[in-house]
Each structure stands twice: as structure tokens, then as C-alpha cells.
Amino acid sequence: MKRSPKRVVLLGSTGSVGTQTLDVIRAFPDRFQVLGLAAGRNIDLLASQISEFRPFRYYAADGREPENCSDCRPASLMELATLKDVDLVVAAMSGADALEPAIAALRAGIPVALANKELVVMAGEHLRDAAEHGGTEILPVDSEPSAIWQCMRGEPQKPRRLIITASGGAFRGRSWDALRSVSPEEALEHPTWRMGRKITIDSATLINKALEVIEAHWLFDMPYEQIDVVMHRQSVIHSMVEFQDGSVKAQLGPPDLRYPIQCALTYPDRVENTTLPRFDPIETGNLSFEELDASLYPCFNLALDIGKRDGTWRAALVGADEAAVEMFLDGKIGFTEIGPVIEQALRDHQSITQPSLLQITEAATETARRVRSMVPALPVLPASTDA
Amino acid sequence: MKRSPKRVVLLGSTGSVGTQTLDVIRAFPDRFQVLGLAAGRNIDLLASQISEFRPFRYYAADGREPENCSDCRPASLMELATLKDVDLVVAAMSGADALEPAIAALRAGIPVALANKELVVMAGEHLRDAAEHGGTEILPVDSEPSAIWQCMRGEPQKPRRLIITASGGAFRGRSWDALRSVSPEEALEHPTWRMGRKITIDSATLINKALEVIEAHWLFDMPYEQIDVVMHRQSVIHSMVEFQDGSVKAQLGPPDLRYPIQCALTYPDRVENTTLPRFDPIETGNLSFEELDASLYPCFNLALDIGKRDGTWRAALVGADEAAVEMFLDGKIGFTEIGPVIEQALRDHQSITQPSLLQITEAATETARRVRSMVPALPVLPASTDA
């Protein structure tokens, strides 16, 4: 059966999720056609992607023109997301720049494969309303919401409980106090996943898991008291869903983001991809579940408490976290300061009820700015020695 | 929303699956109405079930009349299975007596919840054809095929692989040679499941798992090379399904047969049942997968090799296994003789191609008779001492 290829716009093509999305697309040359690519500052990689995938339009955040792309013309993010004939928009950019384009695509009836959980945390209502307005769907790309989405497939009723698994990040099993002087390099050593830098730090603080709980609340319309987090060191079970009758389904697989990416790209089909590692239960051996010890992860409850609030609180959280992680990676604050910095930055946040998209992105930007301005006021960090 | 109750006929109400089916029905007095009950020799239990559930018709295998059931009249199994207005037939009898009634129900368009995997092993083609003819479904009740069925729900394509989990039964980890003189009582001590006697012995020999592979082949139309078995000691993951894209779904829950029974009874709904234990990942702790060591379970490959054959081979296998297990439980043969007895009984089997239902049940009966007649010819067993 000959099918016409799915026409894809990829916002954020040069990052971790973006390059893996193109890996999947590369494995199925007949299934996908890339109509547009948007990148940040990695203009050389964008140029090589343009020459490989031959899109019609590109966006480069810094306005530079990639070399050798005479057929491919520049466009705004908004133009890319609503290009004529596009079948799927993949929102894989970090930051909030893809928020308005994603909402425009959804409102136009174009499904959006969403990798960036921060967008859902900031503007879950807007995204949900836009999908409803357009009669289309948000397809989760991150492994945990993809697992939940896959488990819910074909189930006619709302689940009783979502059980999100957490690897515990780079410092699992270590007490918070012992982490005062860890280096960015140590925090970037995730035990099971290879991901971008920001999300890897968010995994070490477990803020990432709080953001996933908030994301699941909005994506799957589930009350917070029906969303649990359980420690699962192997990152093989990506999440579980308990149904009304108590039966539980889990989605499993090697910790490889190309799985959920492909699942969203080929939806509703499932297609064999021989380039992916295969799940082998024998080789996997053991799977474990442990209680999440919140005392080891003080940022988890901090983020979750804020994330449950309405108005612009969640946007402020995302902005504060982004700036705090950036400052940690730049060596300006210590790992255990990430939480206090976020907390302090949010203390004076003036939330706006029922905010517009602009008010949401402004709340994030403004809080990030406040975080960056706090640095001189912070106590001097101890020198980087073993705790 | 007021719904009319689902009208159920239960074939095999006094056995392990039957009483658990009534446990589930008891938990939902508004959802189910019992139209008919069929039992074997446990006439007292049948009488008390009749007075509790008030069916219109009953069947007792030995023809006796239960006390105090003046409103409830006797009927044949065939009459019960095709009663007017019945919405669901639950086939929970051991042996082959429910085969023809189940097929008649399916042909009449009545879904059949099937607990007895032997029926599928013996007559998979007939059951499948009958369901197709009646435009209805076979709803699996056993935990493994129910898990597969639940995982496949809503998936539009055929899976790539079924992964059936096996607890390993009463003697897991022990070498076959050490089992020469084990007693029926030891073999009946299943580590994770409480079930009927025959299936518990089949679990100790792993013939049960071979029967489940054969059952899955017929129920889900899967080639044998796409069905794997993996040891999973905890009996929490009841089976897994790998889809075309390599993504795997598992169905989990406490080892309690009321789960898959209820899943079939309330299908397509899922309904909260507070009388069931709930899955707790923390309490579960660890899940393990190990390779199935066929040298510890010689009966597994024996049964599977025969089970892959056409004609009346599978019926002969079921008959031989039933009689061999019965003789072991009666102390007439040792545990390690179960396999050789089956093998010897099947050696002279004259398979009939494209057998009728009658030829199928006759093949089972005849092979069971041959097994029983073999006993005097068997070598005298060593006295029951520790190996």
C-alpha cells in the first residue's frame, strides 16, 4: 500500500530531541517529508540538515542564513508551524519560543508532537483549549507521558491512577547535604538517559519529575491526588496506568528517546525500526520500585507545590528553574542553591489570574531575569571541594 | 446512568474459577444477573449458589437435584449455553464438556469468557470459526491471555511478539532428577497462585505454560516463533506484548484470578472493585526476568512440540495430560513420570486431519483411557523418600 508521506515541521532541529527526531525520520525516507526546520544558534548543523532533508522553509534564531540553502527560504516560527499542507508539527525547542506556534498549529487542526514539557506546565489550559478548538491532539514525545498515552490507548474510561517512574537522576541515593559542592559535570552524568543539559540537571534535582506530574495533570486531565511517582532505577518501565478495575498497564523499553519520538511521528501506526535497540527481558534482569524519598529531593515538592497553582505561577516556576539551572551550569551557584534560588525568586511573584499567552511568557521571562539578578546577593559559595 | 444487568450463564460454578467468578458477580449485584449455573459433583455448593443467585436453570453433572431449588429447573449444558437473552457465557468447567456448548454460544453470537485453556488447545480452529461466524468474541479469563488481550486493546496492528511470563511453579530452581519422589502435596504448593489442583500440577511441570503458548497462538493468531516465555518469579507482570515499533506493554497486578475474571465479565467497561487487593509498586519491590531453563522442565518442550501439530494431536495431548496428572495426584505414578507417560500414550496416536468436534473429544477421551490403562505396565516407583 503506497501512502503519501507525512509532512513534518520540526521546531528545534539541532538540539537533543531534534536530532533524534531526524534520526527517526531518516530511518523512514518514504514515510516523512520535512517541510520546515527551525534551529537556535547551531547554524552549521542546520545547514547540513537543510541539505539532507530539503525543507522549503527554515528559521534560525539569530537571523543568520545557513550556507548552501538557496531553495530553502527563511520564515518565522509562526509561519513554519502553520505552513500549508503540514501534517505534524514537532515542538522540540527548549524555552518558550515554540509555545505560540504550537498553539497556532493546534488551533489550525494540526497535531503537535510535544517534547517540551515546560510548555504544558506554563500554558496547559491554552494548549488544551487550542487542541479542542482545532479538533486535534497533542502527541506526547517525552518517555513518561508517551508511556501513559500508550497505556491509555483503546481504554474507554479515565484511569484511576497514573504512576510515573523516576530514575532518581545523577545523585540518587546521596544525601542532599553531600551535594553542596558537586560540579556541573557530575550532575550531567545521568545514570540511564542521554539527554540535553537542562533536563539532565532537572533530573538530578527531580524538578523534571515535578514538571512531568504537572504535565500529566494537564495532558491527561487527571487530579493531582491520582498521580503518583515511584523510583525505578532502571528506566525500563517508563510509566504505568492503573485503570478503574485496578488492572495496571506499563509501557517498557530501552531508555532511548527515539522510541517515544517515533511513536508520536508514526501515530496511529507502529512501524518496525531496526535501528533501535530491542527490549530483552532476560538482559534487563531486574526491575525495582522504591519509594521516592522527598528528603533527598527537596526541589521536587517545592516545584510541585508551585506547579499546582493557577495563574502565572507555573510560568514563573519554569522561568526561575531555567535561569537557576543555567547559573549552576555556568558555575555561578552551587547545585543545592538551585532550589533556594527558585524559591526566593518566586517569593515576590504577583500571579495574574487567567493569563494570556503573552502574560504567561512574560512571567517566565521576568522571573528568569529576577533569578539572574539575584546572583550578587547570594552568599559566596564554598570552594568546590568534596563535601 | 441505569443500565440493564448483564445476563450470565456460568458453566462450572463450583470449581476454583467458578467460585471466584461468583465472588466478582457478588460484588456487583446491579450489574449482573445469573441465568444459569452448571456444576459437577459438588451438589451442596450448587444448591447454596442457586439459593443465593436465583438462576432459572441449572445443570448437575451427576443428574442429582440440588435441594430447595423448586423455581430453578434442570437443563443440559447445551441448553444453558444458548438460553434466550443470555449476554455472556462463562466457560469455567475443567475437561471438555463445555466445548460444544461454548461453540454453540459463539455461533449464536454470545460472547464466551473462556477460563479453560484446554478447550482452545484442543479445538482452537473450531472456536475461532464459531466466534467469526457469530460475529462475537472469545474473552480470555486466564491471567496470561487476559494480560495479552488487555495490552492489545486499541492497538490497530498485529503485535510483533508476545512474551508470556512463567512463575516456574512449585519446584522452580530444583533439578528434575531431584523431583522423582515429590508428593502431590508438595507439587500443589504453588509459590504465587491459588488455583485448582490440575492447573497447579501443570504449573509444576510447566505443561501449563506450553498450553498457554498454544492457546495464545490460536486466540491471537500469532505464529509460534513470535511467542516467547520468560521466567518471572513474582507473577506480577502477567504477560507482555511487543508491538511492531519495539514498544512493549505489560499488564500487572496482584496474582489474583478475580482480576482477569472481572475484566472479561465487565468488558468493555472497567469497574472499581474494592474487594480486590490493589497493586502497590513499593510493596512489590522487585520484578525479575530469567531465561526459561528447558532442562529443568522437560515436559514444556514435550507438550509444545505436540501442541504445534494439527489434527487431533492437541486433543490427545490434553487427554493424556489430564489422565497423567490425575494418576500422579492419586499416587499411582511419580511426578517425573508425568512426561514419560504422556509421551508413551501419544506414541501410537493416529491423528485425524481436520477433525470434527466429536473426533476431537474422542481423541482426548481415548488417549486419557490409554494413559490409565498403562499403569500396570509402568515400572514400580521408588518408595516416597527424599531424593
Image (tube, coloured by chain):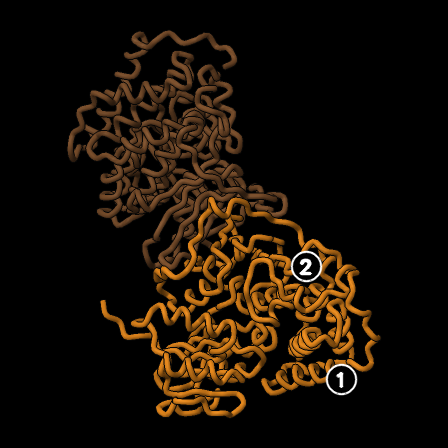
Chain colours: A orange, B brown
- Whether residue A330 sits left or right of residue B377 in the image: it is right
Q: Whole-percent x and y of residue A159? A: 52, 57
Work out how far the residue at label 1 is from the one at label 2, CA to CA, in angstroms.
28 Å
| Quadrant of the drawing holding the N terminus of chain A | bottom left
A131 versus B126 height, above or below: below
* Residue B347 as seen in the image, left or right of residue B186: left
| Residue A317 at least partly seen | no
Q: Secondary structure beneath disc 2?
A: loop
In the image, what residue type sits under mark 1? Ser
Q: B326 or B382: which is nearer to us?
A: B382
* Nearest to the observer: residue A130 or residue B251: B251
Residue tagged 1? A373
Q: Which residue is mark 2?
A: A171
Which corner quadrant of the image does residue B367 belong to?
Answer: top left
Q: Is residue B83 left or right of residue B17?
A: left
For the question of whether residue B66 can be seen, the reply is yes
Nearest to the observer: residue A22 or residue B319? A22
Determine the residue positioned at 49% across, 25% down: B174
Q: Which residue is painted at 54% across and 41% down in the image?
A: B254
Give the crowd class for mark 2: few <14, some 14-19, many >=20 residues within 10 Å: many
Pointer 1: residues within 10 angstroms few (<14), some, or many (20+)? few
Write down the quadrant of residue B74 in the picture: top left
